[in-house]
Image (cartoon, rainbow, N blue to C red):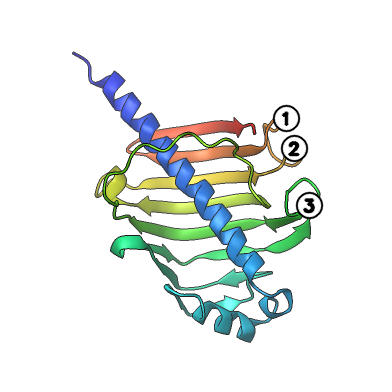
Amino acid sequence: MSQWPLRLRRALGVLGAALAALLVGSVVLALVLLAAAWSLAHHDGATERLLKAVPGLQVTEPKGALLGDFQARRIELALPRGGRLSVVEPAWQGMALVIDGQAPWRVGARAEWLKARQVHLHWVSGPPAPAAPPPASLALPISVVIDRLQVQQVHSPLWGEGRPFGPVDLGISLQRAGATQQDMPGGDSSAVHALAIREFGWVGWRISGTVKVGA
């Protein structure tokens, strides 16, 4: 019997988990930026002191300001139960906070591009728990728009050792009701969250397209 249906279901499940992780990471990044004082985040020295004050966060050789252009040799974040997220050679350009009347908190985060050479995710699952009900709403407190998110490789035991995702090339638009083609390729008046997948590779597969989610 052909193994292609099984492989396809597994690939789609892994793809969904990876895209969900990217969405969560984008929101976390935006919330960290909101937590930073506007005046401090525009100065290199203040940015470095601010990063050192975040529990569980280690940033090696940071250069630039959080709001604006930034790069580092490595970022490591401690996760629950001994897990860890490592980002090798992260960099972004044009990061900014803007007023956005579409978002519940009337604030949005924007970036021209965000890049990394490698991402390593070691997630430690907790004890089994009863299945949670589906969320009543997918609305986020702030909007996030990243014109281009590029990662060469994404490693994790979740989808197999030695089988990294990559290259990954996405456009991200979160909490942008009524987004137009100019805001996000593939956007329409009903989409709240959208991903423009320019390239998503895994074990020889190459995926492209647009994912849109309503409220």
Q: Nearer the viewer, mark 1 or mark 3?
A: 3
Pointer 1 with pointer 2, Cβ within 8 A: yes
Residue sitting at x 78%, y 52% = 100
Measured as percent of width and height from the top left, residue 54 is found at 50, 75
Where 208 falls versus 58 (above or below)? above
* Quadrant location of the N terminus in the rendered image: top left
| Label 1: which secondary element | loop
Residue for point 29% across, 55% down: 124
Residue 50 appears at what percent x and percent y? 57, 80
Element carrying mark 2: loop
Q: Is residue 142 left or right of residue 49?
A: right
* Label 3 sits on residue: 100
Q: Amino acid at mark 3?
A: Asp
Q: Is residue 113 left or right of residue 152?
A: right
Marked residue nearer the N-terminal end (1 or 3): 3
Residue at the front extreme, as displayed: 130
Quickly name the residue at label 1.
188
Can you say whether 90 is above or below 150 in the image?
below
Q: Is residue 83 visible?
A: no
Neighbour class for label 2 at 10 Å: few (<14), some, many (≥20)? many
**Residue occupied by mark 2:** 179
